[in-house]
Amino acid sequence: MTKQDILEYQNNLRKSPIEDPENRLIGTYNGRQMILLKFFKWLYYPEEDYRRRLTPICMQGVRKLPRKEKTSLQTF
């Protein structure tokens, strides 16, 4: 599996702004990115302590998407 395969899978999740006006796909994209990163770290370095595992080449450059909305904190 290559970085291009992972990016194609992740980009398959994208929707148009009309289909997803609240940009909920960003949370889905970021959640799957975290799961894929943990999986490939484990796959490439199974004997290494999880804190010392390096990012495999196939996941280098696959970043989380920034959130578009800022949450507003309400004070009471």
Image (cartoon, rainbow, N blue to C red):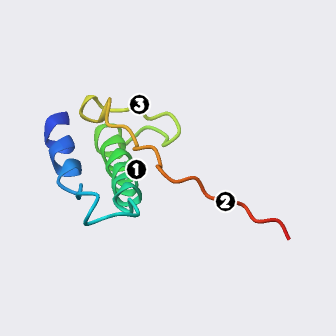
Query: Where residue 47 sits in the image (x, y, percent)?
Result: 39, 40
Query: Seen in the image, is 68 located left or right of residue 74?
Result: left
Q: Do the residues labelled 1 and 2 touch (CB within 8 Å)?
A: no
Task: Determine which quarter of the picture holds residue 61.
Answer: top left
**Residues at marks 3 and 2 touching, judged by CB atoms closer than 8 Å:** no
Q: What element carries label 2?
A: loop
Q: In which quarter of the image is the N terminus?
A: top left
Residue with the mark numbered 2:
72
Q: Report the front residue among 68 and 52.
A: 68
Distance between mark 3 and mark 1 Cα atoms: 14 Å
Q: Is residue 34 visible?
A: yes
- Which-is-in-front pick, marks 3 and 2? 2
Question: Residue at the spot x=33%, y=54% of the render?
Answer: 29
Note whether 30 is above or below 51 in the view shown: below
Residue 9 screen position, x and y as percent:
17, 50
Residue at x-position 51% and y-position 54%: 69
Q: What element carries label 3?
A: loop
Name the kind of residue labelled 2 in the image: Ser
Q: Which residue lies furthest to the right in this view?
A: 76
- First-in-chain label (3 vs 1): 1
Residue at mark 1 to residue at mark 2: CA–CA distance: 25 Å
Left or right, residue 50 beside residue 56: right
Which mark is on residue 7?
Answer: none
The answer to which quarter of the image holds residue 55 is: top left
The residue carrying mark 1 is 34
Mark nearer the viewer, 1 or 2: 2
Q: Residue type at mark 1?
A: Met
